[in-house]
Image (spheres, grey):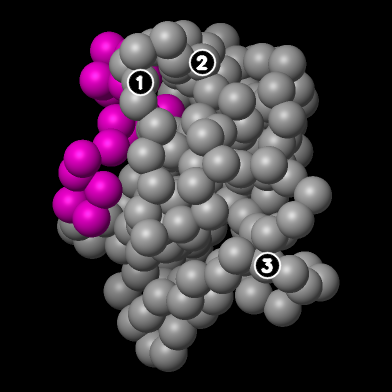
Amino acid sequence: MNTPVPSTTEHPTTAREALEKFTRIVPDFPKPGIVFEDLTPVLAEPTCYQLLVHDLADACREVGADLIGGLDARGFLLGSAVAYELGLGVLAVRKGGKLPPPVHQVSYDLEYGSATLEVPASGIPLVGKRIILIDDVLATGGTLRASRELLERAGATVCGLAVVLEVDGLHGRDKLRDLPLYVVAKDDPRSLVELGVEPKETCSNKSVN
């Protein structure tokens, strides 16, 4: 049975309160034993959406990123709004087959099968760019790890990660242990700088071949 969504007359005052009040909990989806946390009502309620965007932007503000990377697909909704608030551009990390060539591409394993991520290989100067990756949920960590590999192969530096929710028990953060991670729904420090991201002036660029 789904949890009820509150009336829109109930206005939360923090991002975590917005998540607690408006996230739709769906048991046994997409398969038995899994509890799905649906953020659709949170994103659809204007106050909740603004609180989430402000919270993510505050976490990213001090890092000095050049671009915000939004992961396909709900990372687009959050990443683009954060980029707008910070006065930055947004880079959409797309699923395979969505972009015309040439592209930078990386494939990675899923529980069943594999997937591919892409970004343009022309038209966007990525070499030396500092990028923060934003997504809605950290689960197994495979997509975020692959996105980082993709951008670093292209010559960018991924300096931090920010998500709304984290699925406990899947150990996704273990695959990203060397990167600062901000989770809105948890009692993490608000600033990625507090989590170890160096300011733009001192962070050295690197790439992975």
The residue located at (43%, 39%) in the rendering is: 158
**Amino acid type shown at disc 2:** Gly
Which one is in front, 106 or 122?
122
User: Can you see residue 131?
Assistant: no
Indicate yes or no whether the magenta region holds residue 177: yes
Looking at the image, residue 128 sits to the left or right of residue 67; the answer is left
Which one is in front, 65 or 14?
65
**Amino acid type shown at disc 3:** Val
User: Can you see residue 203?
Assistant: yes
Q: According to the image, label 2 marks what residue?
A: 64
Highlighted range, magenta: 173-197
Question: CA–CA distance between discs 3 and 2?
Answer: 26 Å
Query: Residue 71: x and y, percent?
Result: 58, 52
- In the image, farthest residue toward the bottom: 113
Q: What element carries label 3?
A: strand
Q: According to the image, label 3 marks what residue?
A: 103
Where is 152 relative to 66, above or below?
below
The circle on residue 72 is none
